[in-house]
């Protein structure tokens, strides 16, 4: 076991000390803190540049003579200035950037408000919507006055109905639980997907690099190829877990120390206060199983190539499996009860994402995730046994790698 732990330690530390790993981790942590404080940063930049203190002035041409004053009361957060100039004159000032925006108001013969908003800004979306809502309220008031309705009678016209949705399916969750589960499952699916791709590829690249530099010949003379394979899988896997924990800790600290407060919005959406802790446990279980499944396959494929340049081509079938699993799982975010998801969740290469999606968003009977986990464990065992045989001969193979047909040659070489 001494040789095993030496290789394990080397695989862990050699990758942890690389500049790419350190820089990537630092950039991700900085990005997490930046994202958590993005609103505060935008406000600070606007204050420093003077953009946040400028109040936009809306110039109004009121052809009806009865809407400008009402609009001023409705748009309390915006300065409204009624102009005596013509619309054409104001448009000329607008094009020369002397003013910000122009609003022309009129009332047709049926008492319907006609409005035209003109601006030079390509990204002006919020203000037109605010003006439209204000004018809609004025339109309602005018129609109420025309029909001699008081305020209480107008309110009764907009009384919402009492509508309650219930789901009697044994696998259904409440709406709040489902919304929170959907967010968490979406985030963790990305974590599992990206981690499996990144760390599995890292293993295949590391094995191919050792072969191309002839270091492999020295290693296998003192330790068995089987020990070498599993020590490398566990070493890089442990590094991946540490990196994810660092990201998780950084995210927790960023949210707790964030200077941005969004009441009833983003913070509440990511509170997960009513979420079952079992979802997080399943996320950890399926992440570990998915990693070891694909990492073993990556080590097997990486042992068949002699050049680092051939790694991506050799692991392409494995990458397609991960991508297919991710696409299938994503289609179930809106409706996790789709029939094909149930069958896909028992396929071992799809289970890490698809079964986690189902168990996170549905109240499944215990035997379903346990059966999927058991199938994955058996697959990992079989793949590990088969992969060890291929790896034993594959690390001794040199020359151009043609295809997956080299697996047979690696097994025969391993027997010798």
Image (spheres, rainbow, N blue to C red):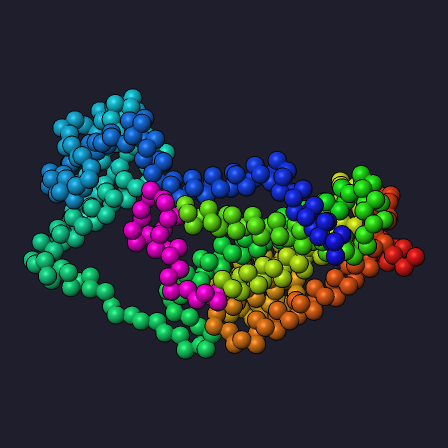
Q: Residue at x 51, y 56 (%)?
A: 188
Residue 364 location, x and y as percent?
51, 73
Q: Residue at x 77, y 59 (%)?
A: 387
> Could you tell whether 25 is left or right of 141 in the image?
right
Q: Residue at x 15, y 29 (%)?
A: 83
Q: Residue at x 52, y 67 (%)?
A: 358
Residue occupying the far right of the picture? 416
Is 238 colored magenta in this rendering? no
The quarter holding residue 218 reads: top right
Residue occupying the far front of the picture? 2
* Along the viewing direction, whichever of 182 and 244 lies nearer the viewer: 244
Looking at the figure, which quarter contains the C terminus? Answer: bottom right
> Could you tell whether 376 is left or right of 330 in the image?
right
Looking at the figure, which quarter contains the N terminus? Answer: bottom right
Is 271 colored magenta in this rendering? yes
Residue 414 location, x and y as percent?
87, 56
**In this orientation, does residue 144 appear?**
yes
- Vertical comparison of 318 with 128: above or below: below
> What span is colored magenta in the figure?
255-279
* Along the viewing direction, whichever of 92 and 222 lies nearer the viewer: 222
**Number of disc labels:** 0
């Amino acid at each position: 076991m001494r040789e095993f732990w030496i290789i394990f330690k080397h695989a862990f530390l050699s990758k942890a000390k690389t500049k790419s790993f350190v820089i990537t981790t630092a950039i991700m942590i900085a990005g997490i803190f930046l994202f958590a404080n993005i609103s505060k940063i935008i406000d600070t930049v606007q204050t420093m540049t003077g953009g946040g203190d400028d109040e936009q002035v809306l110039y109004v041409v009121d052809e009806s003579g009865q809407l400008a004053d009402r609009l001023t009361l409705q748009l309390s957060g915006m300065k409204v200035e009624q102009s005596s100039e013509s619309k054409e004159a104001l448009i000329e000032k607008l094009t020369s950037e002397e003013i910000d925006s122009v609003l022309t108001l009129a009332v047709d013969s049926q008492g319907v408000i006609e409005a035209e908003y003109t601006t030079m800004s390509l990204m002006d979306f919020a203000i037109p919507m605010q003006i439209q809502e204000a004018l809609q309220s004025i339109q309602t008031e005018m129609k109420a006055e025309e029909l001699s309705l008081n305020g209480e009678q107008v309110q009764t016209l907009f009384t919402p109905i009492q509508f309650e949705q219930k789901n009697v399916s044994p696998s259904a969750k409440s709406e709040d639980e489902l919304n929170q589960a959907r967010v968490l499952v979406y985030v963790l699916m990305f974590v599992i997907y990206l981690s499996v791709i990144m760390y599995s590829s890292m293993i295949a690249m590391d094995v191919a690099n050792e072969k191309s530099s002839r270091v492999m010949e020295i290693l296998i003379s003192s330790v068995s190829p089987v020990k070498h394979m599993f020590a490398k899988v566990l070493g890089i896997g442990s590094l991946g877990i540490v990196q994810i924990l660092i990201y998780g800790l950084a995210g927790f600290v960023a949210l707790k120390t964030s200077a941005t407060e969004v009441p009833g919005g983003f913070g509440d959406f990511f509170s997960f206060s009513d979420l079952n802790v079992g979802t997080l446990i399943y996320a950890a279980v399926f992440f570990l199983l998915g990693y070891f499944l694909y990492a073993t396959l990556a080590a097997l494929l990486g042992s068949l190539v002699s050049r680092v340049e051939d790694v991506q081509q050799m692991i392409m079938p494995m990458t397609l499996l991960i991508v297919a699993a991710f696409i299938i799982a994503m289609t179930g975010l809106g409706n996790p009860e789709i029939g094909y998801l149930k069958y896909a969740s028992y396929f071992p290469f799809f289970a890490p994402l698809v079964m986690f999606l189902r168990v996170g968003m549905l109240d499944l009977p215990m035997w379903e995730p346990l059966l999927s986990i058991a199938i994955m464990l058996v697959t990992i065992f079989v793949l590990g046994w088969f992969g060890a045989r291929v790896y034993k001969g594959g690390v001794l193979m040199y020359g151009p790698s043609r295809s997956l047909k080299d697996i047979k040659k690696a097994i025969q070489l391993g027997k010798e």
